[in-house]
Image: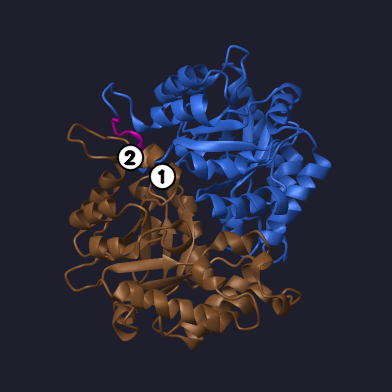
Chain colours: A brown, B blue
Amino acid sequence: MKFTEQLAGAWQKNDSLLCVGLDPDPAKFPAHLKDQPDAIFQFCAAIADATADLACAFKPQIAYFAARRAEDQLEALIAHIHEKHPGVPVILDAKRGDIGSTAEQYAIEAFERYQADAVTVNPYMGRDSVEPWLAYADKGVILLCRTSNPGGSDLQFQKVGAGGTVLYELVAEKVAKEWNTTGQCALVVGATFPGEIAKVRSIVGAMPLLVPGIGAQGGDIEATVKAGRTAAGTGLMINSSRAILYAGKGEDFASAARRVALETRAAINRWR
Amino acid sequence: MKFTEQLAGAWQKNDSLLCVGLDPDPAKFPAHLKDQPDAIFQFCAAIADATADLACAFKPQIAYFAARRAEDQLEALIAHIHEKHPGVPVILDAKRGDIGSTAEQYAIEAFERYQADAVTVNPYMGRDSVEPWLAYADKGVILLCRTSNPGGSDLQFQKVGAGGTVLYELVAEKVAKEWNTTGQCALVVGATFPGEIAKVRSIVGAMPLLVPGIGAQGGDIEATVKAGRTAAGTGLMINSSRAILYAGKGEDFASAARRVALETRAAINRWR
């Protein structure tokens, strides 16, 4: 099934715009997991099992696995989610970006090795660096547009051309009008800038937006939802990672995560 | 030893501005290697052994390893180069780029797990996304500036601000004047645009430039060297991957690679 259809199904079935980010940091794991050889898998699978009926997507961040030689656990985690929770898509947060022949290899990594349903991609190298991802017709390609970090403005807020358009708006325009010929694209727009979410929404129509930055990064849920929702009250994947993952510090970490996921879903749904 | 000192040492000792790119594609390997379980390591190590006295750096491209679950072979390859060919730095071509807490994980991947001497990084997310890399004081951080692919112009050639500056020039200015406070930075500038190499050189002083795009991508060696060399006749890491790696198709692939590396080094040195 196409990523966009999976996502639309999860929005509806789980009544949720919440994307659960899986950024496993073993230093923050409950004590009973710390000595397990597959602690990263166990931790993330337990979080996924506890939140799968509350989420529209899962988003493992590959750096947390790669830093610890845990690629095998990432493979196992995505396979686990596909098997146990079909219908909830998995976004591999990798922010890759390279020339065509190398991008083909990265696409093999994300879509064939890891079996991700979608991947995040950096747009700096332009359209032909994105095409190898789009060659996988069922997969989603989520391009960085406006990122939630302070330095995001360094390039993204540069005025381009004569009309006062800034770079992230140009990225939104290019993706919406030129790159997204197959309907596979989405954009990353940080929750720390609700006015800019609204701006991007006005440029891209109903294209899905992945919104990091609520929770630990301080973004405002009400402002995010009001700025980014579509006429149908969907269109968003609002990501929360640390606030959910580390809600509990003991053996009850998964039920603590479920409690925060329930609260976050409700906080989002209040403004849809 | 600092990356920049290693690089300067290799420029001098090997009389070379040639960077040998290690993009291993098993479909192109000689027949006698194809059934080996560690064919990727064997192929790349043989290329490295055959060219280490002719190169100023090696540049493994991580996507080619990740697409084939060969992270262990990448670790072994970099360890092999460090052990057998000390003084020739290893650049991990990964083009990562993410917010600070995730960039820290990517830096662990590149510098602690793989023990790379330098890494390529995407600047789209701005200065704070680069700082976790710079926290490793001996390591090199090579930022994408002007890439050699056709789509590189989509964003990089956008006019920013009033003065006619385009985005890649702004990246060069920001890196040279603001981000490179510790002398660890370098830039990627494609060989397909010699005039733009000259422009970047005029902005960044003697900062090292990694130049992909000669060989298979068609860049002109004479124009590249004349545009990018410093007053000392160095300052460049001119990358060639496929033309060297796949110079031979049989058991003599390493000596064929050496022959092409010798020719390429001479072709570069002719114009220094």
- The three-letter amino acid code for the residue at tag 1 is Gly
> How many labels sit on residues?
2
Question: Which of the labelled discs sits on residue B66, or is there none?
Answer: none
Question: Which of the labelled discs sits on residue A152, or is there none?
Answer: 1
Q: Residue B156 lies in magenta, yes or no?
A: yes
Image point (26%, 68%), residue name: A235
How far apart, in angstroms, are the residues tagged by discs 1 and 2? 8 Å
Question: Residue A21, percent across and down?
Answer: 48, 68
Callout 1: chain: A
Report which residue position mark 2 lands on: A157
- The three-letter amino acid code for the residue at tag 2 is Phe
Image point (75%, 54%), residue name: B76
Which residue is at the far bottom? A84
Instruction: Rate crowding at label 2 as few (under 14), some (14 to 19) or many (20 or more) other CA atoms within 10 Å.
Output: some
**Image position of A245 (left or right of A71):** left
Write the start and end of the magenta stretch as one range.
Answer: B152-160
**Residue A186 sits above or below residue B110 on the image:** below
Locate residue A46: give its quadrant.
bottom right
The secondary element bearing badge 2 is classed as loop
Q: Nearer the viewer, residue B190 or A262?
A: A262
Question: Residue A6, percent across and down?
Answer: 34, 78
Question: Residue A128, percent across and down?
Answer: 36, 49
Contact, CB < 8 Å: mark 1 with mark 2?
A: yes
Question: Residue A229, percent across and down?
Answer: 24, 66
Callout 2: chain: A
The quadrant the N terminus of chain B occupies is top right
Name which of mark 1 and mark 2 comes first in the sequence: 1
Image point (37%, 54%), residue name: A192
**Residue B191 sits above or below residue B32 on the image:** above
